[in-house]
Amino acid sequence: MFQKTIGFKIFFWSFLLVIGFFAFFPQLWMVSTSLKPATEMFSFSFFKHFNGSNLMRVLSDKIFLRYLRNGIVVAVASSLCSTAVSVFAGYSFSKFRFKGRKTVMALIMVSQAFPQGLLLLSLYPMMQKVGMLDTLPSIILAYIAFTLPVGTWTLKAYFDQVPQSLMEAARVDGSSEWRTMFQIIIPLAVPGMMTIAIYSFVWAWNDLLYALTLISSTANRTLASGMVFTFTGEGGNDWIGMMAASVIASIPVAAMFVFLQRYFIAGLTAGAVKG
């Protein structure tokens, strides 16, 4: 058995503290700055002031609330659609044998090797030709296209772990293919589905590149791109407002992880255990 020496413990805790500092210091600085008055913006102090006026100023901004609403609509829609399509795609690749199956699976995997900006080069002219530029459906479809390969392969791995004998027993009992899928197979893949849903939501919520490229009007901007145009510019940068808006933007994702973390962790670790 591996013995944890004193040197190993010192190295482990030192490494953990360094990583923790780089992970949590920016978040502490963001929250602290959002509570400071403008005169103390660049002062190196933490939670010396508790001024909630910055948060209230951002929440009372109708334009920011529009960005927030658009961001929620886009993130929720892309998350639900990505998860739903991934379920059907992963199930078909796992439980059915058809011509060209391995080729399509390989192409789906290869698509993940390309940078997201390269995918955008093909999506932009497609959206332009069909007249979908500067619309929320265009960016929703773009997020689905980017997250679908990961979701398909993840859920395929879940469905592969379901014994074929379980499906055969359901068919013997008179269960249809659809009923077997929805009442027997899919409930076993709930952790994987939640993992894909969270991954899709967070990716759409935090994205800036796609939002800046496919959306140009103020009415349709999402949260990330809207914050850039609202709090930064040639005339100056409203760092206090940016930090306050960032705190508000972090709340939905933080709440999602708090309430769904057991599904997310189960989804990430299930592949390490043979089912």
Image: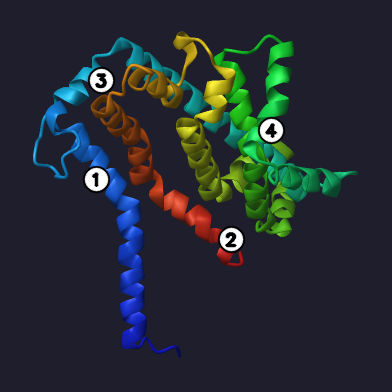
Q: Disc 3 marks which residue?
A: 58
Task: Give, as a three-letter code, the residue at label 1.
Answer: Leu
Q: Quadrant of the N terminus?
A: bottom left
Q: Could you say which quadrant of the image residue 99 lies in?
A: top right
Above or below 1: residue 151: above
Gap between marks 1 and 2, in whole Å? 34 Å
Q: Is residue 241 left or right of residue 249?
A: left
Pointer 1 or 2: first along the chain: 1
Q: Could you say which quadrant of the image residue 249 lies in?
A: top left
Q: Mark 4–mark 2 contact, CB under 8 Å?
A: no
Pointer 3 or 1: first along the chain: 1
Gap between marks 3 and 2, in whole Å? 42 Å
**Dot 1 lies on which element?**
helix
Measured as percent of width and height from the top left, residue 240 is found at 23, 28
Pointer 3 or 2: first along the chain: 3
Task: Give, as a three-letter code, the residue at label 2.
Answer: Gly
Q: Residues within 10 Å of mark 4 (few under 14, many from 20)?
A: some
Q: Residue at x 68, y 9 (%)?
A: 131
Which mark lies nearer to you, 3 or 2?
3
Q: Disc 4 marks which residue?
A: 119
Q: Residue 271, which numbered label? A: 2
Q: Mark 1–mark 4 contact, CB under 8 Å?
A: no
Q: Residue at x 60, y 44 (%)?
A: 186
